[in-house]
Amino acid sequence: MAIQQAGVRSLTVNTCFPDGVNAALGKIGLAPTVGGGNSDLLIPRLQKTIGEALHVPLHNITITLIAHHFHVVSLVRNGSMGGAPYFLRIRLGDRDITKELNLDHILPQSVKHFPSGHLAHPYVASSFVKNILCMINDSGRITHAPGPSGLVGGWPIRLSAKGAEILLPEGIDMTQGILLVEEAQRFDGIEEIQGDGTIVITDQAYSIMKEVVGYDCKKFSPEESEGRAAELIARFKELRKRVVD
């Protein structure tokens, strides 16, 4: 909003849950250029794991991924993609080797030693710095990021001073990709993001939050977000006090 009011064109990188926030803001004409972290964190780890398994340099491995924040959390916590749909293509040089690999082994192996808590912050920060440098230096680098141009989830993109250009892989079109990540976000507790940016919570997530935290919120709009955030923080403080006491 401040950028619009200033009357300038500025590229923006959102650090706050870009898989969902960027899409909600995009519905009201405020989409950040791109996000960072989340599914982008899987790319170098998959390259390293596959490169070591095949005894080839990791820069020879190209990962094309359309996925969601949920996939990362599920993979780290449960060792699987959790049943949520995603698109993954792996190339060695110019050869598609996706079907030659045991993804049920490689995917969890790639995050086996992924740090937790504050120890993960440098990895997350490096993703955002990468995206910022791509735009500042007008590199046109082919990379991956969540929330490009107001989309749900993480996508393969070309990132430059012009912004984020979606690079759809062969075998999937834009409609299919959007349907895929919108289905995946339901596993993360978001039923849908409506045309005015209102975020609707799934019934399961709503019930859990109401029962455990005492937070009664089925949906909220971008305009409500600050007040809702303050209420949620207060509820969690109350929960922590009850647990500690």
Image (cartoon, rainbow, N blue to C red):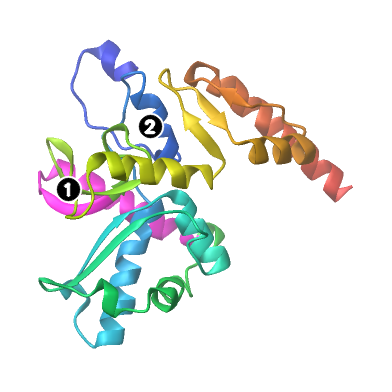
Is residue 132 one of those drawn in magenta?
Answer: yes
Instruction: Say which of 47 and 9 sits in front.
Output: 47
Q: Determine whether the residue tagged by mark 1 lies in a helix, strand or loop.
A: loop
Residue 88 drawn above or below residue 184: below
Residue 35 percent location from the top left of the image: 33, 42
Residue 105 percent location from the top left of the image: 43, 78
Kindly identify which numbered label has been placed on residue 23: 2
Residue 26 percent location from the top left of the image: 34, 26
Instruction: Say which of 10 and 61 sits in front.
Output: 61
Which residue lies at the image location 36% right of the left edge and 62% below the top edge? Answer: 42
Is residue 87 one of those drawn in magenta?
Answer: no
Q: Which residue is mark 1?
A: 167
Residue 227 drawn above or below residue 74: above
Decide if residue 36 is in sight here.
yes
Which residue lies at the image location 36% right of the left edge and 18% below the top edge? Answer: 28
Could you tell which of marks 2 and 1 lies nearer the N-terminus?
A: 2
Q: Determine whether the residue tagged by mark 2 lies in a helix, strand or loop.
A: helix
**Residue type highlighted by circle 2:** Ala
Residue 117 percent location from the top left of the image: 56, 59
Q: Quadrant of residue 51?
A: bottom left
Which residue lies at the image location 42% right of the left edge and 17% below the top edge? Answer: 196
Decide if residue 153 is in sight here.
no
State which region is magenta: 119-144
Q: CA distance from mark 2 to mark 1?
A: 18 Å
The main secondary structure of the magenta stretch is helix
Looking at the image, residue 194 sits to the left or right of residue 129; the answer is right
Q: Are marks 2 and 1 in contact (CB under 8 Å)?
A: no
**Residue type highlighted by circle 1:** Leu
